[in-house]
Every structure is written in C-alpha cells, then in structure tokens.
Image: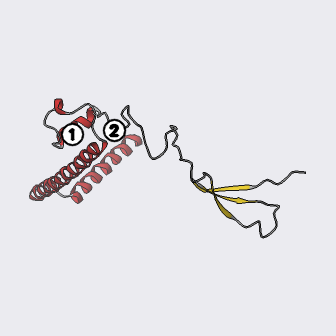
Amino acid sequence: MLAAAESLLRLRPGLIFRYAPGAPREAARWRVAQIWPRDLPRCSSGGVPSGSGPQGPAGKVHRVPAEHKPSQFDKKILLWTGRFKAMEDIPPRIPPEMIDAARNKARVKACYIMIGLTIIACFAVIASAKRAVERHESLTSWNLAKKAKWREEAALAAQAKAK
C-alpha cells in the first residue's frame, strides 16, 4: 500500500500550497507557506545575493548597459536616419535602443517613400488614360478587337482542318 505524501503546489517564486491528503478535514485546509525563511538572503543563479549584483574589487557595483554589435545593414540604417554622419563614426558596440529607434525612423521614412511613389503612380495612370482617350482607345475596343482576331484564327483553323 502506498503512503500518501504531502502535496505541494507552487504559485509563484516564494509561495506554495501544502496539502496533506490523509489529514483530518480541519488540517486539510490549504495554507500558504514560504519556501525560504525570511532571515536567509535569496540568491540568484550566479550564487550572488539577489540585491547586490556583480561586484568589482573595490566593492562597487558595475552596471554595464546591454550593448549590440551592429551589422552592416544596421550601420547603413544608422547612417540613413542621420544618427551618424560617416561609417567611421559608428562605434563597434551601441545600445539596442539606438538601433531600435533608427529602425523605426527608417521604417517611417520607407512608408513615406512608398506613399509618395503611390501618388506619383496614380498621376501617371491618369495621364496615360487621358492620352488613350485622345487616341480613342479603350479597354472595350481592345477586347472586341482581340475577340475578332480569335474568331478569325478559329475560322482559318476550321477551313484548314476541312481540307
């Protein structure tokens, strides 16, 4: 026969529910218990207490911002958006926020360029349609001429087959 052990349900780091299945009804209530005692410091995965962070030889905390090595494409975006004036001005490592801001600015510039090209294409279509009207060309006349040509080719093919 198996002995029932105490059941644990972890809610979040530091809190669990304990439940004893064979306990009397009053003792079987769910109760919240702390995993770590309050007087012990909690440690991060590196073994350093969670409030202190990495420490240097003088005991100071050194925070290094997350940095990113830009690719050639990122460098071109940084130049195009005006963040730097020349390719030589770009440092080997830059904050990711700077790259994100440059990408967003480049995305907006690209959208403006596409909007402008769409407007230019609309005016080009309008101009070519006006020239086609002056030549008395329309899609209907093109369609009728194409169908007449197909009928003529079908009639020639039928005559060739009949011979």
Quick one: quadrant of the C terminus?
top left
Q: Circle 2 sits in a helix, a strand or a loop, which is it?
A: loop
Q: How many marks?
A: 2
Q: Is 49 left, or right, of 14 in this rendering? A: left
Residue 16, located in which quarter of the rendered image? bottom right
Q: Position of residue 34 (x, y in %)?
A: 62, 56
Bin the neighbour count of mark 2 within 10 Å (Cα to Cα): few under 14, some 14-19, many 20 and up: few
Q: Is residue 62 above or below residue 101?
A: above
Q: Position of residue 83 (x, y in %)?
A: 17, 42
Q: Which mark is residue 78?
A: 1
| Residue type for callout 2 | Val
| Residue type for callout 1 | Leu
Pick whichever, 153 or 40, lies toward us. 40
Give how far apart the Cα atoms at labels 1 and 2 are.
22 Å
Identify the residue at image location x=29%, y=45%.
97
Q: Earlier in the sequence, mark 1 or mark 2?
A: 2
Identify the residue at image location x=21%, y=39%.
78
Q: Circle 1 sits in a helix, a strand or a loop, which is it?
A: helix
Bin the neighbour count of mark 1 within 10 Å (Cα to Cα): few under 14, some 14-19, many 20 and up: many
Between circles 1 and 2, the one closer to the viewer is: 2
Identify the residue at image location x=54%, y=47%.
42
Q: Which mark is residue 18?
A: none
Q: Position of residue 52 (x, y in %)?
A: 43, 43
What residue sits right under mark 2 in the picture?
64
Pick whichever, 144 or 63, lies toward us. 63
Q: Position of residue 53 (x, y in %)?
A: 43, 41
Identify the residue at image location x=31%, y=49%.
150
Pick whichever, 37 or 148, lies toward us. 37
Residue 132, located in which quarter of the rendered image? bottom left
Q: Check the image and name the residue furthest to the right.
A: 1
